[in-house]
Image (cartoon, grey):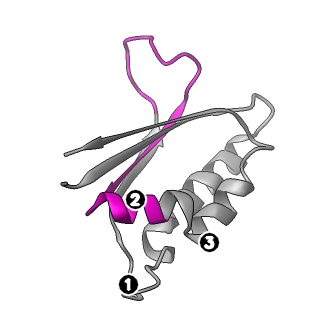
Amino acid sequence: MGEIIHVVQLKFKPEVDNAKVDDIMASLEALKTKCVHPDTKKSYIKSVRLGRDNSPEGFQNGYTHMVVSEFGSAADRDYYALKDPVHLALAGGLPPFIAALQVLDIES
């Protein structure tokens, strides 16, 4: 199995101000260095790209931001999604600010 591209689309609640959105997005970006594999003691997220949508197509369905992370293996992605305490703590704090969340992964 090859590398995994992990895509998260976010729809923030309308009452969430831009400063809070920026703070959340910065925290998501910081996961690249804060998430450390328990065996290797090293960061295991290969890359993180994120930002506000700028598509002219009009098919966003209210989603305004996206995070694209790259993992070297499905095992790394699975650890991140299901066990990494740093990721889980951040994700657990998002519900008050997020109206909807969508996640899709592909193998590259």
Q: Residue at x 19, y 46 (%)?
A: 108
Q: Position of residue 24 (x, y in %)?
A: 63, 53
Q: Residue furthest top?
A: 58
Q: Residue type at mark 3?
A: Pro
Q: Residue at x 43, y 47 (%)?
A: 50
Name the residue at 55% across, 30% down. 64
The residue to which callout 2 is attached is 77
Q: Quadrant of residue 92?
A: bottom right
Q: Secondary structure at mark 3?
A: helix
Instruction: Give the Cα separation between the discs numbered 3 and 2.
Output: 13 Å
Query: Compared with residue 45, is residue 12 higher up or lower down, i.e. above or below?
Result: above
Residue on which the image places disc 3: 85
Work out whether mark 2 precedes mark 1 in sequence or the reverse, and give the earlier one: 1
**Amino acid type at image mark 1:** Lys
Is 38 located above or below residue 8 in the figure? below
Q: Could you say where residue 25 lies in the image, as x and y percent from the top left?
A: 56, 52
Q: Which residues are magenta?
A: 53-79
- Cα distance in 3D space between marks 2 and 1: 14 Å
33 above or below 66?
below
Q: Which mark is residue 42?
A: 1
Task: Decide whether residue 41 is among the magenta residues.
Answer: no
Secondary structure, mark 1, is: loop
Residue 45 located left or right of residue 52: left
**Which quarter of the rendering shows the N terminus?**
bottom left
Amino acid type at image mark 2: Arg
